[in-house]
Image (tube, rainbow, N blue to C red):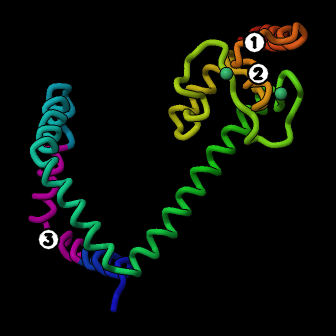
Amino acid sequence: MMNAGEKRLLRNKKAREKYAKDRLNPEWVENRRRIHKKSYTNRSPERVEERKRYYKQQYMDNAEKLKQYQIEYRKRKKQDPEWVKREAILSKERGNNTRLRRRARKQYVVDLLGGKCVICGYNRNLNAIDLHEIEKRFPPEPSQYLKNMRGYEMILDNLEVLIPLCKNCHAELHSGQPLPAEFNKLLADFTSDHEVDEP
Ligand SMILES: [Zn+2]
Ligand SMILES: [Zn+2]
């Protein structure tokens, strides 16, 4: 009994063998080249727009069918205990990788900003450090933007509005009660230092 991975490998192998045989036939090659030329070489904006519209329409027409197909596919797959087991492991690995990547990005950003809470100097655990915004540019909160490359680049482009604060100091800052004067001075100093660093 083959599992899904082995089946896929076999299918790929068969496809490769077929291609190796087909490409010896000049007629087949010519035909393939003609099809490719038609779809790939015409890159005028109108053509690109047209293709985009076409694919979107195709998707819209089949959205309901596609959804139904996905539901049934998963239902079918869930009857295979081996698949369920593998999928659980894979999803866990994926989750771990995402978390690690996000953490590494956060570490990098916090290090760029001094590596510690600006008010009390706390730097023991990265999870307890928040990025506070002077000006709201990352709703709902900046850490959400570390999930993907696009957001990460946005964060790196807007470092001047971010201040690393530990959870305690951050909560105090947002509590609405006036902060001690020396805290305000530390924050102001940090912000102005940062502006000087900017090119
Ligand atoms: Zn603090
Ligand atoms: Zn804040």
Magenta part of the chain: 18-39
Of the numbered discs in the image, which one, if any, rests on residue 25?
Answer: 3
Q: Secondary structure at mark 3?
A: loop
Residue holding disc 1: 177
| Residue 120 x/y as whole percent | 88, 26
Amino acid type assigned to the residue bearing label 3 in the image = Asn
The residue sitting at 72% across, 36% down in the picture is 108
The residue sitting at 24% across, 61% down in the picture is 71
Residue 75 as seen in the image, left or right of residue 170: left
Of the numbered discs in the image, which one, if any, rests on residue 172?
Answer: 2
Q: Is mark 3 within 8 Å of ligand 2?
A: no
Residue at the bottom extreme of this rendering: 1
Q: Is residue 25 above or below residue 183?
A: below
Amino acid type assigned to the residue bearing label 2 in the image = Glu
- Near mark 3 (Cα within 10 A), the count class, few <14, some 14-19 or many ≥20, is few
Q: Earlier in the sequence, mark 3 or mark 1?
A: 3
- Near mark 1 (Cα within 10 A), the count class, few <14, some 14-19 or many ≥20, is few
Q: Secondary structure at mark 1?
A: loop
| Residue 4 x/y as whole percent | 34, 78
Q: Is residue 8 magenta?
A: no
Are circles 1 and 2 on residues that touch, CB within 8 Å?
A: yes
Most frequent secondary structure within the magenta stretch: helix
- What whole-number distance in Å separates the C-alpha atoms at marks 3 and 2? 75 Å
- Front one among 58 and 126: 126
Amino acid type assigned to the residue bearing label 1 in the image = Gln
Q: Earlier in the sequence, mark 3 or mark 2?
A: 3
Q: Nearer the viewer, mark 3 or mark 1?
A: 1
Q: Is mark 2 within 8 Å of ligand 1?
A: no
- What whole-number distance in Å separates the C-alpha atoms at marks 3 and 1? 80 Å
- Front one among 186 and 30: 186
Q: Secondary structure at mark 2?
A: helix
Q: How many marks?
A: 3
